[in-house]
Amino acid sequence: MELACSLNGQRVVREVEPQELLLDVLRDSFGLTGAKRSCDVQVCGACTVLVDGLPVSSCCYLAVDASGREVTTIEGLAERPEFERLEEAFTRHAGLQCGFCTPAMLLTVSSLLEQGELREDDEEIKRHLAGNLCRCTGYRGILEAVAELAMP
């Protein structure tokens, strides 16, 4: 089947198998390794990418379902002007350690900011980030970084 989409702002076309997952196509066909394989059941969030600006678990998202859509990975987000603000906040608040979950966290937060859904309230932030797990930080730094980003 043909996958024709915008990937990080560039039109791409690839032949894919009907059962191929977006995560595998991104990593294996395009060399975009920011999205990570971990749980394979939409629980951990490590594989998060944006499809039409919304976070999706690419480990369970068929590649052909991205046809005609805009797919953004951390590599694409890193090219945008708003990335610097995200990166600085996470660094300043030690919201990252090993970096495994960081791409997904940054993409999710970026989407929330873009949609205007992010507030400074810790409970609200926790609710929005519930699908993104981190084993290293204890979340305090992440919550502080996101709260800073949510400030007007």
Image (cartoon, rainbow, N blue to C red):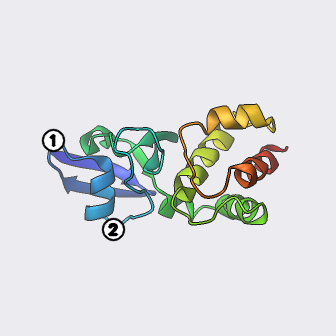
Query: How dense is the environment of label 2, judged by Cα within 10 Å: few (below 14), some, or many (20 and up)?
Result: few
Residue 122 locus on image (x, y percent): 77, 37
> Compared with residue 70, is residue 28 higher up or lower down, i.e. above or below?
below
Res. 12 visible in picture = no
Q: What amino acid is at disc 2?
A: Gly
Q: Which of 79 and 106 is in front in this view?
A: 106
Write down the quadrant of residue 87 in the picture: bottom right
Say which residue appears at 62% left-offset and 48% top-offset: 110
Q: Does residue 128 appear left or right of residue 33 in this picture?
A: right
Residue 77 locus on image (x, y percent): 55, 58
Circle 2 SS class: loop
Q: Which of 151 and 79 is in front in this view?
A: 151
Quadrant containing the N terminus is: top left
Say which residue appears at 27% left-offset and 45% top-offset: 63
Circle 1 SS class: loop
Residue 81 locus on image (x, y percent): 66, 62
According to the picture, the residue beneath numbered tag 1 turns out to be: 18
Say which residue appears at 34% left-offset and 44% top-offset: 40
Q: Nearer the viewer, residue 148 or 54?
A: 148
Say which residue appears at 49% left-offset and 64% top-offset: 75
First in sequence: mark 2 or mark 1?
Answer: 1
| The label number, if any, that marks residue 2 in the structure image | none
Query: How dense is the environment of label 1, judged by Cα within 10 Å: few (below 14), some, or many (20 and up)?
Result: few
According to the picture, the residue beneath numbered tag 2 turns out to be: 31
Distance from label 2 to label 1 (Cα)? Answer: 20 Å
Quadrant containing the C terminus is: top right
Write down the quadrant of residue 82 in the picture: bottom right
